[in-house]
Image (spheres, rainbow, N blue to C red):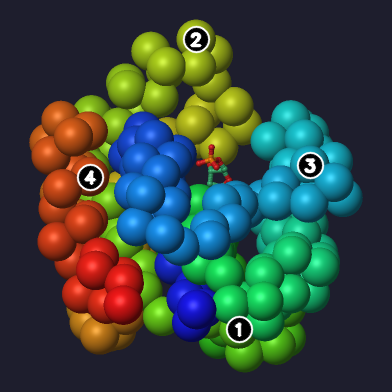
């Protein structure tokens, strides 16, 4: 069995978590071993970092960035790399592109610096396929609010912030068309799932 690293990316309310679960179930039904994880929060340490990240009111953007990098470094070395080495498919709900989009485009932190930190934290372990679930932030923020009943620290940031994040994902998608696949996330979940399936490498859909 050959390993594969897949990430799902997108703004608030894009439906990534739902799609990650549907994709994992589909790939398992095709006979693959799948590890479903997320950032921040894919490990026990990461769960603590995620809580701090989403709930601390006093975080500055650089502090936020270092928390995310601590989470990523641990996540890659403890969970993602071993799973890939064991021939599994790893699906992560958010990865490096979120940092460039949120902390780089959203908060305005130097993008080259983020790229350097991402390279250190991942040790070069990058997804072969990334699905960018695109949604208009005005629609996504309402969806997220309805789903979660309350807003976390990031969701509370203004619409302009979330629009910059969206333009960040668009920029990454434009620059890396071989890796990053655009998926229209305004469709109903089952349709979004089918769009994702159609973009998967054929070898995954009909294993030998
Ligand atoms: P989510 O996993 O429920 O989408 O929430 C995680 C939040 O963390 C979301 O608002 C995006 C944010 N985030 C960043 O700002 N930068 C990152 O690098 C990552 C992984 C997440």
Q: Which residue is mark 1?
A: 125
**Residue nearest the viewer, comparing 51 with 108:** 51
On the rendered structure, is 14 left or right of 67? left
Image coordinates of residue 43 in percent, x first then y, are: 78, 51
Mark 2 and ligand 1: say if the CB distance to the nearest ligand atom is below 8 Å: no
Residue at coordinates 74% horizontally, 65% vertically from top-left? 79
Label of residue 193 in the image? 4
On the rendered structure, is 179 left or right of 74? left
Residue at coordinates 50% horizontally, 51% vertically from top-left? 93
**Residue nearest the viewer, comparing 118 with 192:** 192
| Label 3 to label 2: alpha-carbon separation | 21 Å
Do labels 3 and 2 touch, CB within 8 Å? no
Q: Which residue is mark 3?
A: 47
Residue 206 lies, with reference to residue 146, above or below; the image says below
Label of residue 149 in the image? 2
Residue at coordinates 68% horizontally, 36% vertically from top-left? 54
């Amino acid at each position: 069995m050959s390993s594969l690293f897949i990430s799902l990316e997108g703004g608030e309310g894009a439906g990534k978590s739902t799609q990650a679960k549907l994709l994992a179930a589909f790939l398992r039904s095709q006979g693959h071993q799948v590890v479903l994880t997320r950032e921040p929060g894919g490990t026990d340490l990461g769960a603590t970092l995620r809580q701090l990240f989403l709930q601390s009111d006093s975080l500055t953007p650089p502090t936020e960035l270092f928390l995310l990098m601590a989470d990523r470094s641990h996540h890659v070395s403890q969970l993602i790399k071993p799973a890939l080495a064991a021939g599994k498919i790893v699906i992560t709900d958010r990865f490096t592109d979120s940092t460039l989009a949120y902390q780089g485009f959203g908060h305005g932190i130097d993008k080259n610096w983020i790229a350097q930190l991402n390279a250190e934290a991942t040790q070069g372990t990058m997804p072969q396929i990334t699905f960018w679930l695109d949604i208009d932030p005005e629609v996504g923020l309402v969806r997220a609010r309805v789903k979660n009943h309350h807003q976390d620290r990031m969701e509370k940031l203004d619409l302009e912030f979330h629009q910059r994040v969206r333009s960040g994902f668009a920029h990454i998608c434009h620059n890396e068309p071989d890796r990053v696949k655009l998926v229209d996330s305004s469709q109903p979940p089952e349709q979004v799932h089918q769009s994702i399936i159609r973009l998967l490498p054929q070898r995954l859909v009909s294993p030998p």
